[in-house]
Each structure stands twice: as structure tokens, then as C-alpha cells.
Amino acid sequence: MDRTPPRNQSLMARSVGLSFAARRLATLAATRIGRWTSLLSILALLLFSGLSRYSGSSASSTCRLSLSRVVSHRGVDEDEHGPVPSTLSQIERLLDDGFGSFDLDVFWAADTSVTSLFIGHPPSLRKQWHLDDEVHATPLETLQAKSQSQGGMLRLSDLLGMLARRKADVGQVSLELKFPSHPAWRHKLGLLYAQLAAHKLLDGRIAGIVLTHDEAATHRQAQQAVGLRVPLLCVLRDNDAPVGADGQPHANVSALRRADGTYDGWAPSVKLLEPSLKAATGQRPLLVWTVDSEAHLRLAYLHNPHDIVSNRPRWARRTLQKWQREEC
């Protein structure tokens, strides 16, 4: 039985009603405040996460905005065609696919009356065409007959004509005239620059490859004779580089600094790529060759030189872009 007086019961009922309403209001307020607090917490977390990522990537510079340019070695993609000779159609297909830079060798045939120069890697051609002697000691007629099954020989003049027509698609084409110790080399070098001078639309898009200071001086003389100034890149080979205490070849950094001014850039083997080499070359172009394995490509990606030369250009570009996406 309820022993509370009627008036007190009424007061208690009101009190209970007010308490319930107050608790309801408090619950609603807490719920709304909780929702706003949770929302603000989430926004703050996202903002902090974004700032942390931006700060981290800026500090470590891992999310790079640009990648090294991929250069086609010999104008061939060996993943598609194997180690075949360069042809105009193969180079044009690479241009169509966005590859505007090439690293090519130049040679001549034995006939002294022939003024044409040709594109191709002589040791590879000798093996593929089953030649008894070097290409420069083999008659042009023999070379043409041997090359027919693989698309024929690519004349330098034909290549330059095509590149001039497609100037907008061309990045840089580096040319190395082979057999520098041959008595005819100086004369053939003059022919090479005469042909370059005839295609002035390619100014700034051609570079010469040299191995020594003397070669560079001869190139400069040949350029001056036809009124050209073509940049020269000096090759740094790993097989004759100094070997360090770690048993690995390293570029002679002191020699590089002494040679500063002789060359416009450097073309080192990827096996020589390391921070000291990049520091010694400064802002000069660095054309790294030949990058055909994932380990070497990862090394090049780490140091980010100007150009990466590969026999597998499509694979190299695709892999570099994949790594960039994963970082960023």
C-alpha cells in the first residue's frame, strides 16, 4: 500500500516527469555532441594523416614527380623481336609508342668508294650475319646480301631523314661511330657530321658518344668544320674501372672532376651508378646503360639519372611507372 500523501504524490510525479525529461534531453544532447565529436575526430585524423604523408614524402623525396627517360638501345625492343638489327620500321614503331630517344652505333663498309654510313652494332651484326671479318672490312654487297632476311641495312641518311620529318617526336639520339683506331675513322667521322649538318632540323637532338679525350678533340674538329656544336657524352665502362676494397668496380671520380669541361655529359655503365658518381657529374646529363634486369633497373630508379638505356624499353618504362604509382 502507498503511504505517501496525495499532495506529495503529485509533487513526486512531477519530479519524476521532470527528471525523465531532463535525462532525455541530456541523452539527446550527449548523442548529438557525441556525433559531432566523432565527426570532428575523424576529420582531424584524416587531416593529420594527409599532413603526415605530405611531410614524410617531402622529407624523404620518395614520391618523385618525374622519372628517368627510357632510351631504346639500338632502336630495338628485344622482348618483342629478340636481338635483331635496327630497321627504320622498328624505330618508327617505338616513336609511335612514345619512345623518342635512341642510343645507336654507326659503322661503314669496306668499299672505299661508298660514302654511306650505317646503323647497327658491329659485333652483333658479325655474329648474326655469319661474317668472316669485321663489318668495316666486308664489302657492301656482301653485307646487303647477308642482311636481306632481316630487313636490310639501315643507312644513317635514311634514319636522319625520318627523324627530321618526325622532329616533334624525337628526344635525343646518341650516335657512336665505331672503330676509332681504324685509319679511316677520322674521315668517316667527317662524313657523319656532314650528314648531320644536312639535317639542321635535328639541332639539339643529336649527341656524340666518345671514349677518350682524344676522340672528343677529333669530334670537335669535325663539328667545327661543318659549323655544328653537338654535345659529347663520355662512356664510363665497368670492365676497366678501378676496383674498390669491396671488390666492385667504381668510377674514377677524381678523373671525372679533372675532365670537367671536356665533355657535356657522361654515359656510365649501370654497374658504376652510385651517389659519388652522381655528385661528381653534377647537373650534367647522365646516360646510364644497359639496364635490362630488374636489379639494375631498381638501382637506376634509386639514383634517378637523366636517361636509362635499355634493350627492353617498354618493360623498363612500364616497370618504372609501376614503382612510381606504388610510392605515391
Image (tube, grey):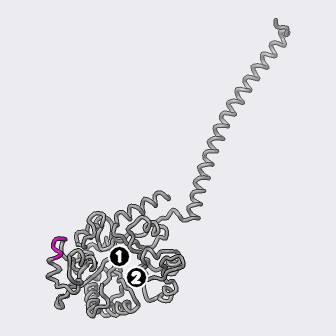
Residue drawn at x 50%, y 89% as measured from the top left: 258
Q: How many other residues sit within 10 Å of disc 2, few (<14), some (14-19) or many (≥20)?
A: some
The residue at which mark 1 appears reads as 172
Mostly what secondary structure, the magenta segment? helix
Specify the quadrant of the image occupied by residue 30. top right
Specify the quadrant of the image occupied by residue 53. bottom right
Asked if the residue at tag 2 contacts the one at tag 1, i.e. Cβ–Cβ closer than 8 Å, the answer is no
In terms of depth relative to the viewer, which is nearer, 31 or 97? 97
Secondary structure beneath label 1? loop
Residue drawn at x 70%, y 26% as measured from the top left: 24
Q: Position of residue 85 (x, y in %)?
A: 24, 73
201 shown above or below 58 = below
Q: Position of residue 3 (x, y in %)?
A: 85, 8
Q: Residue flagged by tag 2: what amino acid is it? A: Val
Q: Which residues are magenta?
A: 146-150
The residue at which mark 2 appears reads as 235
